Image (cartoon, rainbow, N blue to C red):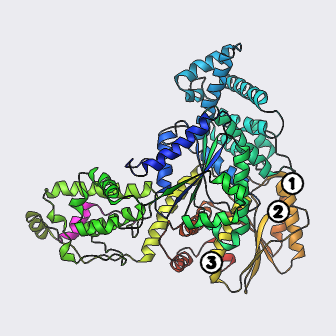
Amino acid sequence: QQHPDRREVFESEFNDLKIVVEEISQDPNHQSRGIVVIGEPGSGKTHLMMRLAQDILETNRLLYIRQPNNAQAVIFHTYSRILESLIESVQSSSHNQLEYLIAHSFAQILENLQSNSTVLTQRDKKILEVMQKNPLKLFSDLAKAETQTKRNYWEHIEKRALNWWDKNYSPAGYAPQIFKGILRFCRYSDPSRRRIVTQWLAMNDLPAEELEKVQLLPWSEEMSREEISLEAIKVLGCLSVLEKPLLLIFDQLEGLGQEHNESLLWSFGESIKEILTHVPNSLVILNLFPHRWQQFKQVFDGSVVHRISQSEIVLKKPPISALKKLLNLRAEMVGFTIEELFTNSEIDKIVRANSIRGVLSTASNFYREKVYNISLPKKYDVDSPSSTPNVASFTIPWQELNERLGRMEKLMFKIAEKLDIEVENLAEEVVVISEQSEVLAKDESEQSEALAKDEVVLNEPILISPRDSIKEYFDRQKVKLKAKFMEHQILTDLDDVGKLEMIIRFFQDSWDKLEIEVLSLGKRVTPEHLVIKIEQHQCVIAFLHEGGSKFCARMRNYNELMSYHPSLQFKLCRDETDYPITGRKSRQQLDNFKSLPRGDLIILNSEQRILFELIYQTIVDIQNLDLEASVDEIIKFISSEYSNFWLWKILPI
């Protein structure tokens, strides 16, 4: 993300991060390390990560991992989120992070072959020639898309790369398959083929005809996703040795500290230790609140604490002088200083906020109160109106002021969006200055008179309710999620069940005597599910995104579970983007399920999927204090505004 920045703010802490990255790169053993970045809510942890991204994204892969929600699949969750990060486009580039990684690492493989006096083929020489201009030319300058020439080149690239892997690591295990899948993803430019490879890399069971298109073999029925996920992350770490260290950033982890997540927290710590032990050339960063890190240390094994926190970086609130410079940086970009915008008393209130985010949020609220007459939140101890200058006090022409304020408003909103700052009471629609002047001057004569006197007449203060603020937050998040789901989002049964449990626990006071449990069918695998019991209703909600033989076996077991529990309603959730069920036996099992009165298939369309993700993300933001709203206010809003949510039709609130 691009955003204004004062480099002297957290300059020392930032340099400490870069030094550790460089130390890993220079270490002959490329041993991975852990860092805990500690700071209060809004202290700048995410901002520091964005600054790091700005500086090293050309050479390092930055991979964001949100909180896991299933104790049995923390490494698989980590790998899935890494894969999502890798296939996202790098800003100001037509390529994604996975292409960057393969291009730079393969260029190094060929250079190593050349320096070792290996006889290079004509194809080797051509590839080297193309990549010397820019390694990313590997994807555009070898041949035209989807031609036999391109296919020949990429078969050669795969052969060279896999030979390098066998020679330097091992041909055994799952790693060569994963590496082949990564190369196959980069080989194709066709989005449909890339989607197939992405789903294969995510270890989903795909139809045979789809796998045939990309020449990949199905995964074994007996595979362990945790084991393969660790192997896959290790492959990425090994490739990064040829480039620069991986940065694995774990963020929004506050929910792990809840009482019912104690086993998940313990599993998370053990999984991070496994990654640090087996994955080379990586820096694992945990962003945490101070009190939460103290709690984690009480739960984690001592060896885990040692590996995770080999370094600790504590972010404290910058001095007032630095905060004023930060505010002026934003104001001066459109020709203002903070002294022109605010009184000394207001500036004092702004910089006394608890965190950097609080400072920016407070400044934005004061600014909007001046320009749009939107009342300040009650928490501010404001001066009397007479002590607050209006827009007319600026000694610049109205037209120039008009233009400056328009630019200022766009800038402030852009800053808030780029930094993921949830500015309190942020207006949903920006009121442009020309529209504001129409409100301020109700007719031509009033407007002419006001402009002649260089005065602005304000209406009564505009009050924005907590509900309005929540709606504005939901609208912004919905836009982000829609854009995100246009990419290749990786859906997994375990992740969805974890999200479902978090949503249900958040709304638990809406039902009487809530109980959550899981059914068992011996050693046989059933769809990932929860049994939800409330006083009025009992049901099982399962997710099954898989296809092929896995779908058939798990669906058969789900039907058997239903026969053993006649008092329960059974729901099965799939997404409209999942591969259709075409196998005869699979269709028969699904039809058997739907034919029973207690069996209900729920297909989530894009609107319902985004709503599911939106409610989940809202809960995460509340837990991580990234959204200033009470639990009661959020529950009331969701209950009334989204009464069509599919979950409420199963569990009325």
Above or below for 354 versus 286: below
Residue marked by disc 3: 507
Of badges 1 and 3, the one in the foreground is 3
Pick whichever of labels 1 and 2 is earlier in the sequence: 1
Give the quadrant of the C terminus: bottom right
User: Residue 651: image x %, image y %?
Assistant: 68, 78
User: Label 1: few (<14), some or many (≥20) within 10 Å?
Assistant: few
Q: Which residue is mark 2?
A: 590
159 w.r.t. 302: above or below: above
User: Label 2 neighbourhood size at 10 Å, few (<14), some (14-19), many (20+)?
Assistant: many
Residue 583 lies in the magenta stretch? no
> Tag 2's secondary structure?
helix
First to last magenta residue range: 428-442
Res. 99 in view: no
Residue 515 % position (x, y) = 74, 80
The quarter holding residue 303 reads: bottom right
Query: Nearest the camera: 27 or 453?
Result: 27
Q: Quadrant of residue 301?
A: bottom right
First in residue order: circle 3 vs circle 2:
3
CB-based contact (under 8 Å), mark 1 and mark 3: no
Q: Alpha-carbon distance for marks 1 and 2?
A: 10 Å
User: Separation of disc 1 and disc 3 at Cα?
Assistant: 40 Å
What percent of the width, then of the height, locates residue 236?
A: 68, 40
The answer to the question of whether label 1 and label 2 lie on touching residues, with beta carbons closer than 8 A, is: no
> Where 438 falls versus 118 (above or below)?
below
